[in-house]
Image (cartoon, rainbow, N blue to C red):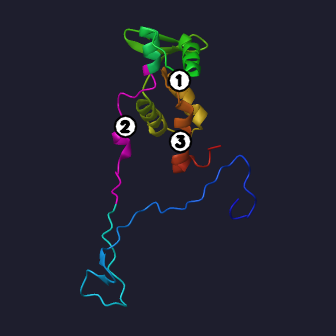
Amino acid sequence: MVSGREPVPTSIFTSDQYKLSVHYEEPKRNGDRSLSPGLGANQPSAPPDLKVMELDANPVAELDPLADWRTPYLDYVLCEVLPMDKTEAQQLTCHAKSFVIIEGELYKRSHIEIIQCCIPIEKGKQLLKDIHYGVCGHHAAPRTLVTNAFRQGFYWLIIVASAKQIVCAYEGCQYYTR
């Protein structure tokens, strides 16, 4: 849009920035003279001390390990606790019909009555990597990886997106991705 100089569609909102997002401290001045005696009147003053924001190299490690996609389902199946949002509560009650608890673990009953163990997303991604990079690993499409994980008896919500991410990131599979 910007490079083609086309008009902005009405569904996209824009805003102009009128204030600086970075605030610099102005050097203190007495009248017309600056406080730094070594600088002449025509020389620019020294730049202010800028602070550099440090970024965390591993932001994933800060995620809350208790935040799990299985928690709302466990709360509903065990304690009948629903979210405050009405639409989320309706979706949860509709989806929770296919979940059962066996020996304290959450399982999903598939449409063909196969019971799959519900695992956290990080364990699921590791499982897909093991299937993909394993001894019998091959350059499979994401759908094949998902099918293999389901055959192993595991389930998690974003399995298809995780499989696509793994396959697209692997150089050898670039040819086979869709």
Comes first in the chain, label 2 or label 3: 2
Tell which of 33 and 156 is nearer to you.
Answer: 33
Q: What stretch is highlighted in magenta?
A: 53-71
Q: How crowded is mark 3: few (under 14 residues within 10 Å), some or many (20 or more)?
A: few
Residue at the (61%, 55%) spot, across then down: 15
Q: Position of residue 53 (x, y in %)?
A: 34, 58
Comes first in the chain, label 1 or label 2: 2
* Quarter of the image with the N terminus in it: bottom right
Residue at the (53%, 23%) spot, across then down: 150
Q: Name the kind of residue labelled 2 in the image.
A: Leu
Residue under pointer 2: 63
Asked if 103 appears above or below 36 in the picture, the reply is above
Residues under labels 1 and 2: Cα distance? 26 Å
Which circle marks residue 165 in the picture?
3
Q: Position of residue 58 (x, y in %)?
A: 35, 47
Residues under labels 3 and 1: Cα distance? 17 Å
Q: Which residue lies furthest to the left in this view?
A: 37
Which circle marks residue 10 in the picture?
none
